[in-house]
């Protein structure tokens, strides 16, 4: 029995087992080919395609993993309703990926989900981690597994999840994992809304209001010449002006440490925002210069 779905023209081949994808990657390496991994949870949009396109430029073989990882969802989060759209994802990827690795939960966690885990460290307790306890431990655990399974030369992550990128880089450095982590710029709709698989939850009113997040980032950056407090105040004012948007946090961090910057900080920074728009929680971020 084979676990691989042979590629149909214009679509990548699909492997559902670890053994199968490992053997595909092993063969590629034996041919001297470079391998790139694009870890995803599916429901692919243009942001993911941009990750795959970047991977194409860096490697001979592009593997996209599609796995909705239960470990990184809290009990009241959207694991069950998270969109699972494998057929559309394969269509969207077309020639951008050579192989899709789409395992089941049992394939990834054959002994159950509560065995060995990565502990993400202090930065994981802030921002997304404060709102989503355990999220980053679960995310890093699956990323570590995927890196171990595929053993890519490079792995692509979207800059939209800035704290995720920071923590993945930290894990790779701390655990001496031999892979290059590439952060790929955020892809936005014409009005500025950052692409996200969760945007499909937005009803028309929420979709209109959702642009507030990128506008708040813009206003924060525009006021940053007057310092940290003025920048934060400008961003918060933008959110407060939009009734359907409930701010979770707006913060300015030092990109080197991912810690909130002190009042007198000057220089490059990242502004982070998370907010609930209707029933959907969205995040976004932007690079700014303070002072
Ligand atoms: O960013 C995501 O989609 C997920 O957190 C990732 C990196 C695929 C791990 O499940």
Image: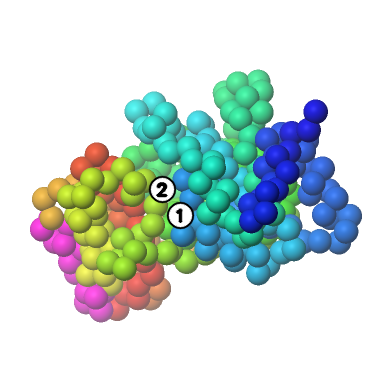
Identify the residue at horizontal 59%, vertical 28% (top origin).
Answer: 105
Q: Residue furthest front?
A: 9
Task: Say if mark 2 contacts mark 1, CB within 8 Å.
Answer: yes
Residue under label 1, please give it: 45
Question: Does mark 2 have its CB less than 8 Å from ligand 1?
Answer: yes
Is residue 237 within the magenta segment? Answer: yes
Is residue 27 within the magenta segment? Answer: no
Where residue 161 sits: x, y (%)? 44, 54
Quadrant location of the C terminus? bottom left
Question: In the visual, does 52 lie left or right of 232?
Answer: right
Where residue 169 sits: x, y (%)? 58, 55
Whichever of callouts 2 and 1 sits on the residue coming sooner in the sequence is 1
* Magenta part, dominant SS: helix
Task: Please name whichever residue, 1 or 99, is drawn nearer the observer in this view of the structure.
Answer: 1
Q: Residues within 10 Å of mark 1 (few under 14, many from 20)?
A: some
Where residue 171 sits: x, y (%)? 60, 49
Residue under label 2, please give it: 197
Identify the residue at horizontal 68%, vertical 67% (top origin).
Answer: 58
**Can you tell which mark lies on residue 208?**
none
**How was this image coloured?**
rainbow
The residues bearing labels 2 and 1 have C-alpha atoms spaced at a distance of 7 Å
Question: In the visual, does 169 lie left or right of 233?
Answer: right
Q: Quadrant of residue 14?
A: top right
**Residue 220 visible in image:** no
Identify the residue at horizontal 68%, vertical 49% (top origin).
Answer: 8
**Residue 87 visible in image:** yes
């Amino acid at each position: 029995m084979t676990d691989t779905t042979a590629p149909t023209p214009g679509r990548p081949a699909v492997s559902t087992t670890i053994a199968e994808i490992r053997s595909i990657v092993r063969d590629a390496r034996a041919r001297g080919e470079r391998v790139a991994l694009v870890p995803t949870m599916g429901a692919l949009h243009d942001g993911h395609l941009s990750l795959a396109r970047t991977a194409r430029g860096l490697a001979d073989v592009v593997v996209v993993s599609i796995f909705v990882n239960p470990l990184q969802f809290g009990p009241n989060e959207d694991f069950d309703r998270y969109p699972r759209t494998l057929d559309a994802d394969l269509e969207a990827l077309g020639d951008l990926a050579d192989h899709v690795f789409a395992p089941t939960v049992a394939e990834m966690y054959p002994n159950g989900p509560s065995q060995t885990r990565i502990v993400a460290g202090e930065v994981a307790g802030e921002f997304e981690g404060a709102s989503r306890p355990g999220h980053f431990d679960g995310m890093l655990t699956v990323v570590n597994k995927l890196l171990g399974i595929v053993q890519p030369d490079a792995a692509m992550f979207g800059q939209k999840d800035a704290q995720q990128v920071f923590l993945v880089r930290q894990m790779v450095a701390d655990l001496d994992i031999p892979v290059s982590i590439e952060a790929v710029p955020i892809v936005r709709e014409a009005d500025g809304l950052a692409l996200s698989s969760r945007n499909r939850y937005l009803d028309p009113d929420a979709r209109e209001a959702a642009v507030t997040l990128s506008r708040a980032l813009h206003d924060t950056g525009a006021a940053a010449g007057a310092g940290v407090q003025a920048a934060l105040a400008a961003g918060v004012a933008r959110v407060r002006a939009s009734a359907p948007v409930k701010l979770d946090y707006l913060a300015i961090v030092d990109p080197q440490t991912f810690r909130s910057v002190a009042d007198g900080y000057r220089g490059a920074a990242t502004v982070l925002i998370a907010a609930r728009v209707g029933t959907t929680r969205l995040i976004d971020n932007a690079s700014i210069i303070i002072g």
